[in-house]
Structure formats: C-alpha cells, structure tokens
Image (cartoon, rainbow, N blue to C red):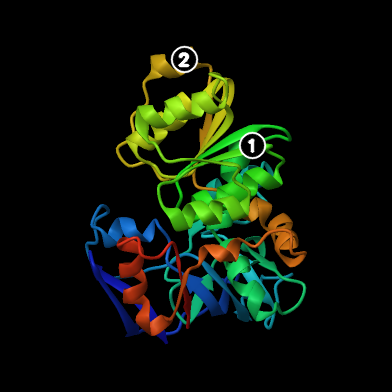
C-alpha cells in the first residue's frame, strides 16, 4: 500500500509499505477514506521533535472497516468508522471517567496518512456512523478524529457555560474548532485571537463575536478592555507556547478557567502567579473518544460544519506539498484522499 513516511525534518515521502494486519484479537484494519495533516505533525516536520529514523506518520482518519480480530464485537467489516488518535478500551476506570487518552491500556495510533490503518482496541476506539456518509460530510467527520474533538475538550476543560464569555487563543484548525465548541456550549461572547484575515473570517462564521489581533500583554489588555476590566470566564489555549499560555492565564478572570490543548513546548508556569490568580487550569491530549457520539450527531444533523477548516485537499501522493503549505501557513489544514 502507499503510506507517508517522514525521513527527516522537511523530508516527507509516499512509499510502498506492507499492508497492516491484525496482530491482536482486539485489532481492526480499516481502509482509509480520508486522512489529514495535523499541526502537531509539523513539530517533527520542523525538527522541533527529533526524527531518528524513517517513520510512518499521521494520526487522523475516517475509513471503512476491512477486517476485525476475533475478540472485536460491535464493529463490523463494511462500517464507516471514526476513531481517536489514541486507542482506548472504553471500559477501564479512567475511560469511564471520560479521560480515554489516559486509558489504562492506551496505545497511540500512527501511520494514518496511508491507504490502510491498523487500529488497536477497535471495539473501544472506533465509533460507526449509522450509514455511509455523503461526500460533503466526510471532511467534518474527519475533524472529529482530532481537531474538532480537541476544540471541544478545550471548551469543556475551560468550563464554558451558557452566557459565558470565552476567549480562544490560536487560530489554527484546533482554535477555529474551539470557537465552534464555545458557541455550541452556549457562550454568549466568543473572542477569537487572530491576525490572519481569512482565519478571522472563518472564526466569525463559526460564531466568534469579537476578534483581537494583539498578542502578549497587549492581547491581555485588549481582552480586559472588552470585559470591563474583569477578564474572561473561560479561555481556550490552542497553541502551546510560553506566550500563548501566559496570555491565556492572564486573560482569565479570578475564578475562571483555562482549558489548554496546544501541546506545550517550553512552557513554564509561575506557581505564585497561578496561586494568586484564582484561575483553574486543566488540559492535556483531548479524550476525543468521549465526545465522538455527540459530535457525530451534531455533524450529521447539520448543526456544525467543522470540515470547513480544510482549505487544501490533495491526493495522498502529494502529501509533501500538504505539509509544505501548512508549514508556510498557506493552508490552515490539508485533507488527503488515498
Ligand atoms: Zn480505558
């Protein structure tokens, strides 16, 4: 099969690799219908995370089940399925508490920018869509595998409630999905922090009521200004840098919450500042499996259309261009069709 392999920073290739097989009785193999490039794939593409040897890459997928192991029930060949980037049993105490990405049997799913994917713990990981979706719905369903689920978790972790004022830090695909999530959870005001005109426009269409272009201390001052000097009830941090995290914490009112889903790189938090801020902080790799049934319903019923974050669609063979376009910020997110 054709599969994407990263050889070194900036070196992405499509190669012929053996098709994955069932290796444990709890596995499934799916034929990928659509996959995509994640902002977090760019960490290794840019050399921020080391690439020691060639490795298959990609962790977002929707597809049709080809084969299941002998212990898999509830998931059958022929079904159109979505799963998280972390496989989970959906049964252990941690999963039952809703934190599937920390499942006691968690396994990261990788190598998804390929024609076929092996999904461990298939019964707990995959959720079947009631019927074969139409072409138009595929991009939105694909976002549920990571970015939309991650935006949703950011909003939940930040405690967005009806009537709340929410700030979204970051205008990548996750940040834009976080705008959708804040609106769906009832935020009355959604302030999106973005400097890019096309992203600002999409944020507004997704439900942002205000746009803040300033960053750092100036960004904090602007949010304070928009909230009568108080700060926001909920801040959704979708970047993962020192500046974005500090900006998030300082934009939140005392007693408010920050939900952080941008993978932190070099972020340090001052304990005393956090202590005196009275701000609650929760984040981590989003347990997207927990919200999959709900989000599938919202997509199928037409309530949300997060697939609009894909502004570039390429055949899998052109995946290298997909990475390049995102690296150069020419594209928000690249969808790939094997
Ligand atoms: Zn579990």
Q: Is mark 1 within 8 Å of ligand 1?
A: no
Query: Can residue 103 be seen in this snapshot?
Result: no
Q: Is residue 183 left or right of residue 30?
A: right
Q: Is residue 54 left or right of residue 204?
A: left
Q: Is mark 2 within 8 Å of ligand 1?
A: no
* Mark number, residue 283: none
| Residue 158: x %, y % from top left | 59, 34
Identify the residue at horizontal 54%, vertical 48% (top origin).
286
Q: Which residue lies under the disc numbered 1?
A: 189
Identify the residue at horizontal 63%, vertical 40% (top origin).
156
Classify mark 2: helix, strand or loop.
Answer: helix
Q: Quadrant of residue 10?
A: bottom left
**Mark 2 surroundings within 10 Å by alpha-carbon count, few (fewer than 14), some (14 through 19), many (20 or more):** few
Q: Quadrant of the N terminus?
A: bottom left
Viewer-proximal residue among 87 and 191? 191
Q: Quadrant of residue 161?
A: top right
Q: Which residue lies under the disc numbered 2?
A: 275
| Residue 157: x %, y % from top left | 59, 37
Identify the residue at horizontal 54%, vertical 28% (top origin).
226
Foreground: disc 1 or disc 2: 1
| Residue 60: x %, y % from top left | 50, 66
């Amino acid at each position: 099969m054709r599969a994407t392999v990263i050889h070194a920073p900036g070196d992405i290739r499509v190669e012929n690799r053996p098709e994955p097989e069932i290796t444990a009785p709890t596995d499934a193999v799916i034929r990928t219908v659509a996959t995509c490039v994640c902002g977090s794939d760019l960490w290794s593409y840019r050399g921020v995370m080391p690439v020691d040897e060639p490795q298959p890459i990609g962790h977002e997928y929707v597809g049709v089940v080809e084969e299941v192991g002998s212990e898999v029930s509830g998931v059958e060949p022929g079904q159109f399925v979505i799963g998280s980037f972390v496989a989970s049993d959906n049964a252990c105490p941690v999963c039952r508490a809703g934190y599937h990405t920390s499942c006691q049997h968690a396994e990261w799913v990788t190598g998804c920018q390929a024609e076929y994917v092996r999904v461990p713990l298939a019964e707990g990981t995959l959720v079947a869509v009631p019927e074969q979706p139409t072409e138009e719905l595929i991009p939105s369903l694909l976002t549920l595998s990571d970015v939309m689920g991650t935006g949703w978790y950011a909003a939940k972790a930040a405690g967005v409630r009806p009537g709340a004022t929410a700030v979204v830090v970051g205008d990548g695909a996750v940040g834009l999905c976080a705008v959708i999530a804040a609106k769906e959870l009832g935020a009355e005001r959604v302030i999106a922090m973005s400097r890019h005109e096309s992203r600002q426009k999409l944020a507004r269409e997704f439900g942002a009521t205000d746009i803040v272009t300033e960053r750092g201390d100036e960004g904090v001052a602007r949010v304070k200004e928009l909230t009568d000097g108080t700060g926001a009830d909920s801040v959704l941090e979708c970047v993962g840098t020192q500046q974005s995290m500090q900006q998030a914490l300082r934009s939140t009112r005392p007693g408010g919450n920050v939900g952080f889903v941008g993978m932190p790189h070099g972020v340090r938090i001052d304990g005393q500042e956090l202590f005196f801020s009275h701000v609650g902080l929760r984040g981590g790799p989003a347990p997207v499996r927990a919200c999959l049934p709900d989000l599938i319903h919202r997509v199928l019923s037409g309530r949300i259309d997060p697939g609009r974050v894909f502004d570039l669609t390429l055949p899998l063979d052109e995946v290298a261009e997909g990475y390049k376009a995102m690296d150069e910020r020419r594209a928000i997110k690249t969808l790939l069709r094997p």
